[in-house]
Image (cartoon, rainbow, N blue to C red):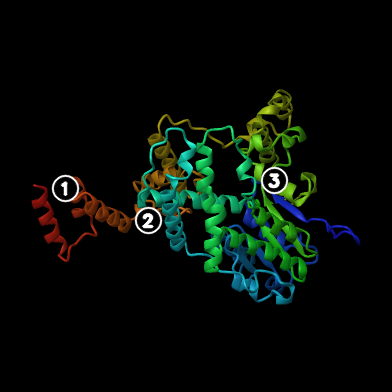
Amino acid sequence: MTAGGAGTEPVARVFTIPPTVDFLDALVAGILDGRIIPGVAPRTDPLALADLTLYVPSRRGARALGESFLSALGTRAAVLPRILPLGDVEEDRLAVEVDPDQDILAGTGLAPAIPPLDRLLAMTRLVEGWSKLLSPTALQLLPGAAPAVPVSSADAARLAADLLALMDQVATEGAGWDALAGLVPETFAGHWQITLAFLSIATSAWPDLLAERGLLDPADRRNRLLLAEAARLAARPGKPVIAAGSTGSIPATAALLSAIARLPLGAIVLPGLDQDLPDDAWAAIGPEAASHPQFGLKNLLGRMGIGRTDVQPLVPPPSPALALRSRVLSEAFRPAETTEGWRAAVTTLADTPPGLEAAFAGLSFVEAPTEREESATIAALLADAARAGSGAAALVTPDRILARRVAVDLRRFGLEVDDSAGQPLGTTSAGILIRLVTDVAARPADAHVLLALLKHPLARFGREPGAVTSAVRTVEM
């Protein structure tokens, strides 16, 4: 694709990599071979990589992409591109390249974000102050309401955390509070008026507090940085820029992706855009079908002002069988309003070479009656794959509890696995010790909690391990 003519908006350069292909390896191969940005083919000129900037969704993705480049380049010397996580757009990086005369926020003068702990404590104080005013003001709206009792500090902290989470969601979506008062008619219960009074903390008191301190909310600041980066790239489109793997779920991120796609040397690469789903089913993916796997990508294309047919496949599926499998799964996820198309789809797919049996060869389905059997089955399958040495095996799941159960079950096979989501502090040995200490302080008369602390392997109490074990046995008896 090339830029549009004079007076027209540049054409977006957008690619997708099918889910049946290794995303990072296909991305690196496309970059090195010059299939993503015309004229930029670093395979023949390794130094050309130094001019490339790559945006990826996370730090882990950035590390994995760097490893893919090293694997693809082998023993050849090269300067790797700048690989930056979209979730960590930093002011100091932008300040180097932003022209202050253009008055772009990210370079100079953007207020710092309020620290998380200071933010929670400040909001807690505001909630406590609001609760003291609740009785003579808002509760008068409720007939027969009893006098209010100011909330405790613990309740205020909980309400403050919930309100901050709501504010972050509003800021992330780029929404505002202007229409809040008109959401519920006056004829509804007075409880809504109390809610409005509570939300006035977010709409009035909190902005005043931030302005007084010269600070910004983290989500608001991130949005400003992303939009500033989009403005910077549009103002200085000199070097190749690629954004890969992001679905643009945040409007500010979508604006940045749209700017990158329309740069003369820019492109974005989407993960697994469904180009097999029939047009009627694609059109039905909307707010009612927000749980559809393609909902985020469709929203992104809409924000960018391009259609699904404008997206080019970077690589084809590795085989006709996997291509057919993708089509079957695409049909299975049809929005409910269009499932009448299944009847015709079943006939069509069954007659498509190489056939459904070949498409699902090697794919197994296990229905576990309990969660315990589910994790044990997965662990056994992973252990078998490890013993066979047939290649990499991975568990992909959004269920963090299931992932931790599988990791524990794998230890019985002598396997230690890396959980890409990390380990919660509370489940580590040190985290459990901290929790037990606080439990004993809160419930000193609970013998079970006390014994759990005494038996913890990190609880030494300044003594040798043998002495501690003997003393704990005495206490337990």
Q: Which element is circle 1 on?
A: loop
Q: Nearer the viewer, mark 3 or mark 1?
A: 1
Give how far apart the Cα atoms at labels 3 and 2 are: 35 Å
Q: Are marks 2 and 1 in contact (CB under 8 Å)?
A: no
Give how far apart the Cα atoms at labels 2 and 1 are: 26 Å
Residue visible at 75% across and 52% down? 304
Q: Position of residue 322 (x, y in %)?
A: 66, 40
Residue visible at 48% across and 54% down? 420
Q: Which mark is residue 299?
A: 3
Q: Position of residue 385 (x, y in %)?
A: 47, 45
Please tell me which of labels 3 and 2 falls first in the chain: 3
- Quarter where residue 229 is shown: bottom right
Name the residue beneath numbered marker 2: 425
Please tell me which of labels 3 and 1 falls first in the chain: 3
**Amino acid residing under circle 3:** Asn
Please tell me which of labels 2 and 1 falls first in the chain: 2
**Amino acid residing under circle 2:** Leu
Count of numbered badges drawn on the protein: 3
Give how far apart the Cα atoms at labels 3 and 1 are: 56 Å
The N terminus lies in quadrant:
bottom right
Q: Which mark is residue 445?
A: 1
Query: Quick one: 398 or 413, which is closer to the camera?
Result: 398
Q: Which mark is residue 293?
A: none
Residue visible at 23% across and 57% down? 457
Q: Which element is circle 2 on?
A: helix
